[in-house]
Image (cartoon, rainbow, N blue to C red):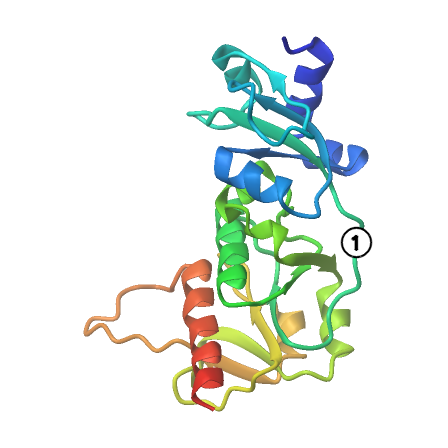
């Protein structure tokens, strides 16, 4: 049976300030929890409506469906919820193919981009300090376990880009077509805020402006969703690597 303290703790972890204060975050669903259990993340507590969930070395609190609904942030909870410890921060990368995000605010977009990084073999995602927290429950849910394989770094993005020797590419509505420009194996791809794009301050340190051309005859669509744009750009970078 869940204690009042356990319920209070899990509900508090929906808020960023408590996640940061306690160094804990919530993962829900069989697939995602299994991914985290099989990773280097350290388990804090595991709750399931199925008592045998997890390995014999993992203590699992057996709870009812009603109790699970009381602590879940999902409309339809999926049998298991776990609390994990946040890992210590690691140094930001200076090699390889890196994705950088400038003040993304939508949790679903960040979670999807983490999945895309995982799919395309991008190990490091660099985020501005105002970008949505990667341990937000909606981000964790949307990432579907890919957070266990992608390192997410939060830092002053301008200072980081200025310190890099890698080529820096920015995604804009107007720029050279990503299908025509020369793309390196290693580099930093910057994508901007959903409403405002890449900030003016960052534009000053971006060396190459790339764009995704629009093929529709009417061209009334204002812009692509940032996660969709990330998928197209990463696919094109990786395709060039295969063709070399």
Q: Position of residue 18 (x, y in %)?
A: 74, 31
Q: Which type of secondary structure does the marked residue at label 1 adopt?
A: loop
**Is residue 235 rendered to the left or right of residue 206?**
left
Q: Nearer the viewer, residue 149 or 140?
A: 149
Q: Position of residue 173 (x, y in %)?
A: 43, 73
- Mark 1 — residue? 89
Quarter of the picture holding the N terminus: top right
Q: Position of residue 21 (x, y in %)?
A: 80, 34
Q: Nearer the viewer, residue 175 or 154?
A: 154
**Is residue 153 rendered to the left or right of residue 54?**
right
Q: How many marks?
A: 1
Q: Nearer the viewer, residue 173 or 72?
A: 72
Q: Does 189 sit above or below residue 88? A: below
- Residue at 60% in and 22% down: 47
- Residue at 35% in and 64% down: 222
Could one spot residue 135 in this view of the protein?
yes
Count neighbours of disc 1 (C-alpha within 10 A) and say few if under 14, some if 14 to 19, many if 20 or more. few
Q: Does 4 sit above or below residue 223? A: above
Dividing the picture into quarters, in which one does residue 93 lie? bottom right
Could one spot residue 14 in this view of the protein?
no
- Residue at 19% in and 74% down: 217
Residue most toward the left? 217
Q: Position of residue 160 (x, y in %)?
A: 75, 71
Residue most toward the front? 56
Dividing the picture into quarters, in which one does residue 174 lie? bottom left
**Is residue 181 rendered to the left or right of residue 24?**
left
- Residue at 49% in and 11% down: 66
Dividing the picture into quarters, in which one does residue 99 lie? bottom right
């Amino acid at each position: 049976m869940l204690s009042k303290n356990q319920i209070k703790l899990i509900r508090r972890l929906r808020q960023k300030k408590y996640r940061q204060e306690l160094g804990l975050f919530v993962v829900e669903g069989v697939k995602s929890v299994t991914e985290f259990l099989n990773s280097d993340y350290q388990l804090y507590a595991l709750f399931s409506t199925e008592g045998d969930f997890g390995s014999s070395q993992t203590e699992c609190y057996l709870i009812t469906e009603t109790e699970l609904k009381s602590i879940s942030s999902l409309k339809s909870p999926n049998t298991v919820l776990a609390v994990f410890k946040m890992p210590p921060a690691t140094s930001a990368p200076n090699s390889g193919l890196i994705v950088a995000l400038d003040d993304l605010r939508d949790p679903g977009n960040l979670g999807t981009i983490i999945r895309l990084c995982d799919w395309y073999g991008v190990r490091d995602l660099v985020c501005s300090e105002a970008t949505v927290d990667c341990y937000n429950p909606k981000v964790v849910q949307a990432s579907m376990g890919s957070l266990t394989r992608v390192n997410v770094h939060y830092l002053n993005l301008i200072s980081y880009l200025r310190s890099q020797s890698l080529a820096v590419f920015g995604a804009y509505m107007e720029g050279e077509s990503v299908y025509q420009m020369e793309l390196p194996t290693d580099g930093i791809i910057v994508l901007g805020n959903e409403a405002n794009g890449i900030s003016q301050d960052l534009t000053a340190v971006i060396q190459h402006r790339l764009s995704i051309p629009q093929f529709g005859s009417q061209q009334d669509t204002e812009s692509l969703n940032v996660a969709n744009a990330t998928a197209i750009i990463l696919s094109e970078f990786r395709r060039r690597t295969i063709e070399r």
